[in-house]
């Protein structure tokens, strides 16, 4: 069963071959969440052990939740995750440099079949998620399995991203839709009518 995690095939996540490895990852995640606020260097070192890949200057604010403790997560550099970041990393999650996650963001790679008989037996499938560079996912955003988000994208708070989002846009809603492109006005104003003066 463990060989089917990354193929998109149906598999049984409670299979012994899957659970044995997953529980080891969750033990390490438990230790990460038990670190004290001043133990930033310890947290950084732990994330380098826990993640598939993680660049420099990444920070995740505990509590952090992850099905595999980050084992299938690939972060670029300078990625920030606020409180309650949930990475359902039953297969791979790719996140580009300088991307930020607001509190309570969920990135899900796992799905379950619509057919009730298959769900009753506990079957699951996984599809990877790709998030580009320099994105900002606001508080409470949910990204569903198989979604790709381009570079320089803002996803508005509370959005549910069910389909791919192109680069250089602001997208909001449930389901999440492109609202507009990043524009000249964004070079002049950072929030409502507040001018950029730095």
Image (cartoon, grey):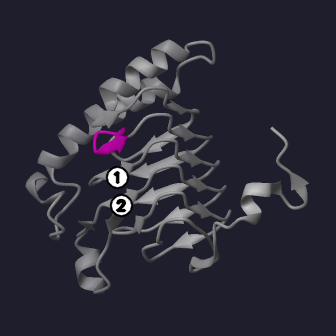
Q: Earlier in the sequence, mark 2 or mark 1?
A: 1
Nearer to the camera, 70 or 198: 198
Q: Are marks 2 and 1 in contact (CB under 8 Å)?
A: yes
Q: In the picture, which quadrant includes the C terminus?
A: top right
The residues colored magenta run: 69-75
In the rendered view, would you say 173 is above or below 90? Answer: below
In percent of width and height, residue 171 lies at: 61, 72
Residue at disc 1, secondary structure? strand
Nearer to the camera, 74 or 22: 74
What's the residue at 27%, 37% (across, down)? Answer: 52
Q: Name the residue tied to disc 1.
A: 93
Picture quadrant of residue 19: top left
Nearer to the camera, 160 or 26: 160
In the rendered view, would you say 90 is above or below 44? Answer: below
In percent of width and height, residue 76 lies at: 39, 39
Q: Name the residue tied to disc 2.
A: 129
In the rendered view, would you say 143 is above or below 75? Answer: below
Label 2 CA crowd tier, 10 Å (few <14, some 14–19, many 20+): many
Residue at disc 2, secondary structure? strand
């Amino acid at each position: 069963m463990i060989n089917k995690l990354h193929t998109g095939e149906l598999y049984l996540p409670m299979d012994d071959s899957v659970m044995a490895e997953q529980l080891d990852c969750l033990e390490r995640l438990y230790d990460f969440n038990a670190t004290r606020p001043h133990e930033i260097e310890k947290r950084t070192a732990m994330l380098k052990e826990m993640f598939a890949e993680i660049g420099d200057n990444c920070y995740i604010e505990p509590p952090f939740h992850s099905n595999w403790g980050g084992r299938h997560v690939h972060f670029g550099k300078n990625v920030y995750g606020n409180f309650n970041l949930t990475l359902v990393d039953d297969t791979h999650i790719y996140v580009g440099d300088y991307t930020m996650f607001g509190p309570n963001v969920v990135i899900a790679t796992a799905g379950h079949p619509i057919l009730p008989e298959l769900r009753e037996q506990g079957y699951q499938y996984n599809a990877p998620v790709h998030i580009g560079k320099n994105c900002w996912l606001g508080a409470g955003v949910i990204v569903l399995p198989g979604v790709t988000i381009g570079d320089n994208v803002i996803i508005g708070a509370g959005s549910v991203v069910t389909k791919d989002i192109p680069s250089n846009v602001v997208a909001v809603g449930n389901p999440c839709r492109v609202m507009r492109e990043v524009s000249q006005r964004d070079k002049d104003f950072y929030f409502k009518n507040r001018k950029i003066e730095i």
